[in-house]
Amino acid sequence: MTAKLGDLFPKEDRDEHAERLLAKGAVLRLYSTDINNRKIKRLIIIGFADQGELGKIYINSNPQSDHSQIQLGASSRDYLEHDSYVDCSRIYEDDRNVLLEMIKADLSCCIGQVSSADMERIESSLKAARTIPLKQKRRFGLIK
């Protein structure tokens, strides 16, 4: 079996790199257990709460007519294989340390970073979403 490039670096360096990768706007490709159709999905980190939780939203391949969503074209985004849709109707919560351990185990699950312009569009849509409780919007720094 061929070693991954990241495996050749000391554990301390990999751990520090994983910490830097787990940031607002990070795009990850992970097996998702908190959706109905459990599978490997792309997700975006949208913020962190004081209690060690993070907020994430999913990227879908197909538009969902009943959701608030942002379309992203693949041509200018290396982390997408085809045009996709960011679901801004719900924020999923996860333990920051659990995701950090997943990243440490496989650094290649971090596939990109959304641009600041895309993040502004996403945050605007999340703020306006009536399906997301105000308390949750506050917890992840979307509103004051």
Image: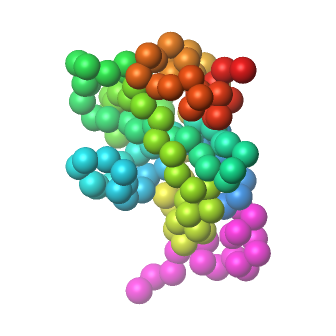
The percent coordinates of residue 141 (x first, y second) are 68, 29
Name the image quarter holding residue 103: bottom right
**On-image quarter of the N terminus:** bottom left
Q: Is residue 106 left or right of residue 29?
A: right
> Residue at the location (46% across, 17% down)?
129
**On-image quarter of the C terminus:** top right
The percent coordinates of residue 16 (x first, y second) are 75, 64
> Residue at the location (67% across, 53% down)?
52
Q: Is residue 113 above or below residue 111?
A: above
Q: Is residue 82 above or below residue 22?
A: above
* Main SS of residues in magenta: helix
The percent coordinates of residue 36 (x first, y second) are 25, 47
Q: Is residue 49 left or right of residue 79?
A: right
Q: Is residue 17 left or right of residue 38?
A: right
> Residue at the location (41% across, 22% down)?
131
Q: Is residue 135 magenta?
A: no
Image coloring type: rainbow
In the rendered picture of this protein, how many numbered marks are placed on residues? Answer: 0
Q: Is residue 55 above or below residue 117?
A: below
Q: Is residue 2 magenta?
A: yes
Q: Nearer the viewer, residue 114 or 96?
A: 96
Q: Is residue 78 above or below residue 96?
A: above
Task: Please report the bounds of the magenta region as a residue range.
Answer: 1-17
> Residue at the location (55% across, 41% down)?
55
